[in-house]
Each structure stands twice: as C-alpha cells, then as structure tokens.
Image (cartoon, rainbow, N blue to C red):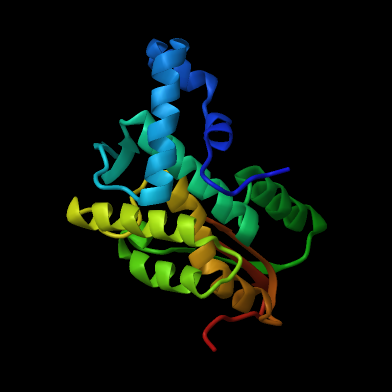
Amino acid sequence: MYNPTFHEKTLARHLTAADFQKDNRLFDPAFKANVISRAVELGRAGFPAVSFQAHTLRGKAVYQLTDISETLALRHINSNVRRITHVKQTDRQVIVDCIQRFMFEGVAFNVFKYDIKSFYESVDTFRIIDRIKLDPAFSGQSVRSLESFFVQVDQAMIPGLPRGLSISATLSEYVLRYFDEKVRQNSRVWYYARFVDDILIVTNRNGSLDS
C-alpha cells in the first residue's frame, strides 16, 4: 500500500539506479541511510535551502537539483501530488496517431496550433499552494514542505515553475486541468490535445474558435 508520509522506507523507494551511477557513495549503507534520513527531515520540516543547477536548453533555463536528499524529498511530494490529482502528460505519439487517423478518414477539418508563451515562467506558484491547501486530500506535511520549496525557488530568483523538475511538470498539468476541460466541452472541437504548453485543436472545416 502506498504511504504518503515521509518515512525512511517510503523515501528509500524513490532511489533509482541512476542515482547510484551518479554517486557511488550510495552503495555505502551508512551514507545512504544519512541521505534518506535528511530527506525525511526535509519532508517533515521543509526546505531551508535548495541546491539548484541551471543550464540552457533552446533558449530557456532548465534546472535540476544537485543534492540527492532534496531530490528524494521532492520526488515523494511529486508522487503524492500525482496520486491525488491523477494528472499526467499526454503522450506525443498518441497525439500524432490521432491526427493521422483524421487525415486517413478524408474528412475536411481545421487544425489550430497554439503555444503558451513562457508558460512555466508565468505560473504563480503560491496561488497553486493556496489551491492545494484547500484540498483536504493533501497532507499538511506535503503542502508545508512544497510551500517551503517554492519559497527557496522565489529566493533563487527563478520565475514560476522551474523547468526540468518533475514537480513542475506535474503542477503545470494541475494548473491547466480546468482550461483543458473547458476546451473539450466546446461543441466545435472534434479533438483537443495539449503537451505541456503546446496546444492542438481540431474542428470541422467551418469551425472557428473566435467565440
């Protein structure tokens, strides 16, 4: 059974083979235990600091955490959020397959493609926290820890959701759930798909999204 609390056993399950490849000190039981113990403390007490490493990808700043304990704590928070909200990203290949089926059917249609400019950077993370606080499904522990993480993000002068982190991808889906639902309810929309901030909408030949 899944355990949402911050405990040594639950945090240990978030270690991956890649973690051991990056830092072979994890093969030392004492070092590993210390890493997990610190991750538990971060989850329970919050993040007093966060070690970010940034690089640029296609003109955008992308971040990763360099501290394994911080990474483990954030992975567990991310897992909790995903289990409660049931959010997940659409598979790009699924989108491609659906468009190909429209083409093979020989029916006229319009395709609209949009991009949410600087979406990650424009998200108000503390509004997300406020929404999560109102949801009784979330444990207070996870919410407090996540809030402390975004305090550190703000102090690091990183705008919005830091690109490259799994929690950012999860929360971006959480933010846009209502938008996705409203678009799908539009009677002129035959097909709607979104991959992060890339949006694809298919309507009939006379379909318009102006109103």
* On-image quarter of the C terminus: bottom right
- Residue 197 visible within the image: no
Image quarter hosting the N terminus = top right
Residue name at image x 40 percent, y 59 percent: 144
Q: Position of residue 138 (x, y in %)?
A: 56, 63
Q: Nearer the viewer, residue 58 or 205?
A: 58
Choose between 89 and 99: the one closer to the eye: 89
Instruction: Give coordinates of residue 193: x percent, y percent.
Output: 62, 60
Q: Residue at x 31, y 40 (%)?
A: 63
Residue 50 shows in the view:
yes
Q: Residue at x 44, y 20 (%)?
A: 32
Image coordinates for residue 176, horizontal then vertical, percent:
52, 67
Q: Residue at x 49, y 67 (%)?
A: 175
- Looking at the image, the residue that sits furthest to the right is 105
Residue 107 horizontal/vertical position (percent): 77, 65
Report whether 73 appears left or right of 14: left
